[in-house]
């Protein structure tokens, strides 16, 4: 959602904050801001636009905070960019999350004579802290937070103090412990080039950072807490674009290795969880957006491979299902970031009913990783493009492996996925990409693209639509092939692009028939399939991957979406109006 980075140390803060914030731009990219403390005064710089295009930052001081924003409350303006200050410019705050009761707090504060400069919910925090500063910085922050409802991560600086105060409730904040310098950030890449030693803040925990150390306490009980330092082993290079023009293309190409990494799990753990699914009193797969489509694919894969009924519920709707939860129910969440608020809320609901939570997560140490009873890390490495690609196929691979284990065929599943990983490696070559780019050139000015699939590839049709929408801003919709004739056929006319996802399976003939129905109405048929067919106007060959066909079928659509975005002059890494990690409800 938004990106936060704070620094206190023996170096000039501004260049460090500027560089670090650029690494968090994937979290929020409509505006940004900085504040440093110099000779007892707060210096602020804010702007609208992309931080990656910002060159210099002339703010003095060795302590500072900064923020890249993805607007929720208040439009994209300089005034609404963070940091926000109190009336007397003594307190400066950066914040990720939503103050759910900000309207009543703002009314109260206005009634007591406070002057507001922005339309944000965040500004109430600065004014609340201002009211209690007499009792000390730390106490004033605690008091203010006791009034605030909602999930958040925030970092506060006070005029004249050499401390940064960071507090987390529901949104990620990580401390980077360096030598004579300390960092606090929403994500590790922000400071990874400066320190690999991290400490994860827990909910309701406060960290007080100075140049020489960090103290922790629980803001509700006031008790001091001890933290374990975790050493990050992955490389900062992994979170860079390298020679690729965009993260999205780099991450698509990384699928040569990531599918293999995802299935490289402890087989006993996979089998144990599969056995639990078999015994459970109902299993719910929960996720949002693309991860939700992987959950839906899980429903089909379990049905086909393991003859087992599991249920997919989208994260934000899960609370409506609480009546069906029993202590023997199992919840399996799927999330790249591990920070999606709707999924975290679903987990809270499930835990209240005593439900065991298993998660498939990419980000180690994320909230979901830590609140789950068991986590499988998908090991895809940092995914920075807003549109998920390599995490999606890694999740699909792991879900497929679990389904095979649930059917008592773990080895068979592993073999299938290893062969698929190797086929993906062969597929991702420059000629293949060029063939799809040629199609993108043909489609780039189309107003609509439709995608059909059946069975395992119905969820992939839905996911294909998400990819095309978010990266190219072309209206795209996915349907179950059989549904075309129940409405969407009315939208097909001469030349309408229709992508048919076809696997060598028992529904192959049916999807071809559905594509024919569209072709009879003038549709331009793009077949994604292991074999060509006379009805295709354009054929993109994929390997015959059997029950792993969702993995190979989504990859060409990812490449298509990428090139459509580029050809339309969009930045495929930063989808308009979207954020990578959706930490608000
Ligand atoms: C689309 C996309 C989103 C995410 C969704 C959930 O390409 O990436 O739809 O899948 O916001 O995010 P995670 O997986 O982090 O829970």
Image (tube, rainbow, N blue to C red):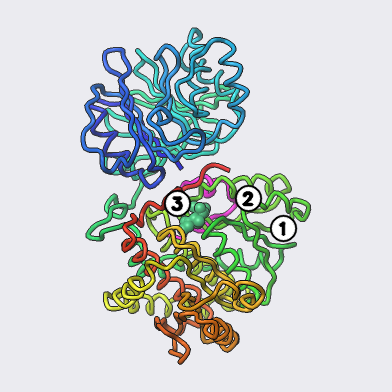
Q: Where does label 2 land, which residue?
A: 316
**Quick one: which residue is furthest to the top in this view?**
134
Q: Which dot, 1 or 2, sits closer to the camera? A: 2
Q: Which residue is mark 3?
A: 363
- Secondary element type, mark 2: helix
Q: Which residue appears farthest toward the front when viewing the image?
A: 494
Q: CA distance from mark 3 to mark 1?
A: 25 Å
Question: Which x, y percent locates residue 306?
Answer: 64, 76
Dot 2, how many residues are within 10 Å of its Cα: few (below 14), some (14-19), or many (20+)? some
Residue 377, compared with residue 50, is above or below; it is below
Q: Is residue 397 magenta-colored?
A: no
Residue that extends furthest to the bottom in the rendered view of this protein: 534
Which of the image's four quarters has the C terminus? Answer: top right
Q: Is mark 1 within 8 Å of ligand 1?
A: no
What is the CA distance from the residue labelled 1 to the residue labelled 2? 19 Å
Earlier in the chain: of badge 1 and badge 2, it is 2
Tell me the magenta residue range: 363-379
Residue 483 shows in this picture: yes
Residue bearing mark 1: 329
The answer to if 374 sits in the magenta stretch is yes
Answer with the quarter of the image where residue 505 lies.
bottom right
Instruction: Report the front residue among 255 and 372.
Output: 255
Instruction: Using the rendered image of the protein, determine whether residue 528 is visible from the camera's viewpoint.
Output: no
Q: Is mark 3 within 8 Å of ligand 1?
A: yes
Residue 501 lies, with reference to residue 95, above or below; the image says: below
Label whose residue precedes the other's in the sequence (3 or 1): 1
For image coordinates 54% across by 20% down, the residue present is 142
- The span from disc 2 to disc 3 (Cα, nearest Å) is 21 Å
- Name the side, left or right, on which 44 lies relative to 391: left
Q: How many C-alpha atoms fall within 10 Å of the one at disc 3: few (<14), some, or many (≥20)?
A: many
Q: Position of residue 11 (x, y in %)?
A: 22, 27
């Amino acid at each position: 959602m938004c990106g936060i980075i704070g620094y206190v140390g023996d170096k000039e803060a501004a260049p460090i904050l500027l560089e670090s914030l650029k690494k968090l731009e994937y979290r929020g990219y409509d505006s940004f801001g900085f504040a440093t403390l110099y000779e007892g005064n707060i210096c602020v710089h804010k702007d609208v636009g992309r931080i990656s295009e910002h060159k210099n930052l002339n703010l003095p001081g060795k302590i500072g905070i900064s923020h890249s924003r993805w607007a929720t409350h208040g439009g994209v303006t300089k005034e609404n960019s963070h940091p926000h200050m109190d009336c007397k410019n003594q307190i400066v705050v950066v914040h990720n999350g939503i103050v759910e009761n900000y309207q009543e707090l703002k009314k109260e504060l206005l009634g007591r004579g406070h002057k507001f400069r922005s339309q944000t919910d965040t500004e109430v925090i600065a004014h609340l802290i201002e009211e209690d500063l007499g009792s000390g910085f730390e106490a004033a922050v605690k008091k203010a937070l006791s009034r605030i409802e909602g999930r958040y991560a925030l970092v506060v600086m006070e005029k004249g103090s050499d401390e940064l105060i960071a507090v987390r409730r529901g949104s990620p904040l990580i401390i980077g412990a360096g030598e004579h310098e300390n960092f606090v950030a929403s994500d590790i890449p922000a400071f990874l080039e400066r320190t690999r030693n991290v400490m994860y803040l827990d909910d309701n925990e406060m960290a007080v950072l100075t140049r020489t150390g960090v103290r922790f306490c629980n803001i509700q009980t006031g008790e001091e807490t001890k933290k374990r330092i975790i050493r990050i082993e992955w490389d900062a290079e992994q979170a860079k674009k390298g020679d690729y023009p965009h993260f999205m293309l780099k991450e698509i190409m990384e699928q040569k290795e990531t599918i293999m990494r995802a299935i490289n799990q402890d087989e006993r753990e996979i089998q144990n969880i599969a056995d639990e699914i078999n015994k459970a009193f109902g299993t719910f797969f929960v996720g949002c957006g693309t991860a939700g489509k992987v959950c839906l694919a899980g429903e089909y894969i379990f049905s086909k491979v393991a003859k087992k009924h599991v249920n997919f519920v989208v994260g934000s709707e899960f609370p409506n299902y609480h009546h069906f939860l029993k202590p023997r129910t199992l919840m399996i969440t799927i999330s790249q970031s591990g920070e999606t608020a709707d999924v975290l809320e679903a987990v809270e609901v499930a835990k209240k009913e005593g439900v065991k939570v298993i998660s498939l997560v990419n980000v180690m140490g994320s909230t979901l990783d830590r609140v789950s009873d068991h986590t499988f890390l998908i090991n895809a490495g940092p995914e920075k493009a807003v549109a998920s690609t390599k995490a999606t196929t890694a999740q699909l691979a792991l879900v497929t492996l679990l389904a095979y284990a649930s059917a008592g065929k773990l080895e068979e599943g592993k073999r299938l996925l290893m062969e698929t990983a190797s086929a993906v490696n062969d597929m991702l070559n420059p000629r293949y990409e060029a063939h799809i780019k040629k199609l993108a050139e043909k489609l780039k000015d189309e107003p609509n693209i439709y995608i059909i699939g059946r069975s395992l590839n119905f969820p992939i049709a839905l996911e294909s639509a998400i990819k095309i929408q978010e990266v190219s801003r072309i209206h795209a919709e996915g349907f179950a092939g059989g549904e075309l004739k129940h409405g969407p056929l009315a939208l097909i006319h001469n030349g309408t692009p229709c992508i048919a996802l076809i696997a060598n399976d028992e529904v192959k003939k049916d999807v071809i028939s559905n594509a024919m129905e569209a072709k009879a109405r003038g549709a331009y048929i793009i077949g994604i399939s292991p074999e060509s067919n006379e009805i295709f106007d354009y054929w993109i060959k994929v390997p015959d991957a059997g029950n792993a066909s969702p993995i190979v079928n989504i990859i060409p659509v990812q490449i298509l979406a990428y090139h459509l975005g580029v050809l339309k002059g969009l930045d495929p890494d930063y989808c308009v109006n979207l954020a990578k990690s959706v930490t608000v409800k």
